[in-house]
Amino acid sequence: MPRMKFYLLQIRRNTENVRLEDSRERKRGLSWCCLLPLLLFLLLLPLLGGLWWFGVPLAVREKAASAQSVIYNFYRDLSVRSAEPAKESIFIVPPIVAPHNETNKTNPLPPQIIYVREPAATCPVVKTCCDDVQLVQSQVALILARLETLQRDKDVERDEWQKNRQSTDEETRRSIDELRLMLVRVEKEIVIRGQIVPQSVIERESFSLEDVRRLVVENIRRYDEDKTGEPDYALESSGATVISTRCSEDYKWGHSQLSLFGIPIPFTSWTTSPRLAIQPDMKPGQCWAFKGNQGYLVIKLTGDVHPTSFSLEHLPKNLSPTGKIDSAPKDFEVYGLVSEQGPGYILGTYTYEDNGQSLQNFQIKTKLYPEDTFSFVELRITSNHGHPEYTCLYRFRVHGLLVKRDE
């Protein structure tokens, strides 16, 4: 009986050995079956990679590469940020005791040791949101600063637009005032020309002897009206006066011919008054003569005048005893004064031509408002036509509109 059990045990062991060999053969076959496709895939992988590299567009390759880099970075951060490694827990399993009988007197199996790998602790968040919040805050701050700059620029542009609009309005008002003044002057000129040339004569295509005679008479009458046909507000007989000559020095005419013990005895020396410059007399020698070529003359007008033009008159060349007028003023300036010692506003710089008419008119060059008036006018002569000793001023006129007459 024991031998029978021994044979059965041998047969069982042989059977198990055969089964083990069969399972090993099967595993070997399966391993070769799995290994051959893997080897074939490894052989074909470079070929597939080349085809993909040259066949797929560049944008798709870059997108795939970026996706791979994102996945790689994600897993790398996971591996770095993992706080604790996985732990192994040891459990001791008590031995399994077979039922005790007479036939089975074998020793019980030893206790089994089981290693159980616990899951790793929950990984922390790979990337916190603090950096994103700071980035968003900085972007919002930049946007707000940009908005403030734009608002400031808008305010500056609005202020400039308002200033430009105000200046444009002022220029428009000034232009309107100038047009009104020009209209007054044109109307005045029309009246003067209408008095000189009758409308009936202007409308005719031919002139008769009577028309010519009438024109001559009108021109002679105009010549008698101070040669200009305009009122002179610097005329002494109309109420104007000479206030000052500043630092100008009167020229002394004549000199002494006798001497006593070497000392000259003056007897024929005299000077002329600056009042002659605002009087209508135009005889030779009836002028204000001052030393040198620079002189000043301050005139108080007949009232508050809005000036429009000036006239400077000198002795004609054909009436000069020498045939020259080198003592005539050449360059001069005119200033408007509110008071005698007040600030002066330059009204123009002019030049008197010695080869021109004896009476020359000069229009005002400075733009004035209709309400701009002056009670005083200053004439500044800066040069003459070549006389080395003195300058003669025969007549100076001021034309314009009388706003208020002095009482």
Image (cartoon, rainbow, N blue to C red):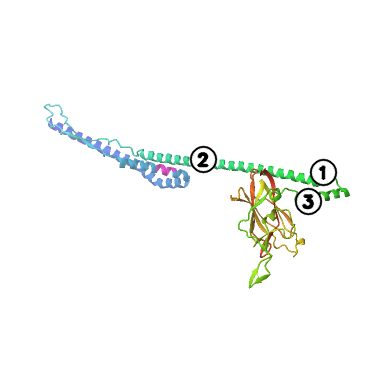
Q: Which region is colored magenta?
A: 63-68
Q: Quadrant of the image for the C terminus?
A: top right
Q: In this view of the protein, can residue 208 be seen by the observer?
A: no
Mark 2: few/some/many CA within 10 Å (<14, 14-19, 20+): few
Q: Position of residue 196 (x, y in %)?
A: 80, 47
**Which residue is most to the front?**
260
| Marking on residue 155 | 2
Residue beneath the point at 86% across and 50% down:
213
Residue 93 vertical position relative to residue 338 in the rendered view, above or below? above
Look at mark 3 in the image and give the residue it sits on. 224
Q: Amino acid at mark 1?
A: Gln
Residue 359 vertical position relative to residue 322 in the rendered view, above or below? above
Which one is earlier in the sequence, the residue at label 2 or at label 3?
2
Q: Of 173 and 196, which appears nearest the observer?
A: 196
Which one is earlier in the sequence, the residue at label 2 or at label 1?
2
Q: Main secondary structure of the magenta part?
A: helix
Q: Amino acid at mark 2?
A: Asp
User: The residue tagged with tag 2: helix, strand or loop?
Assistant: helix
Which one is earlier in the sequence, the residue at label 1 or at label 3?
1
Q: Of 85 and 182, which appears nearest the observer?
A: 182
**Residue 66 falls within the magenta-colored stretch:** yes
Inter-mark Cα distance, 2 to 3: 65 Å
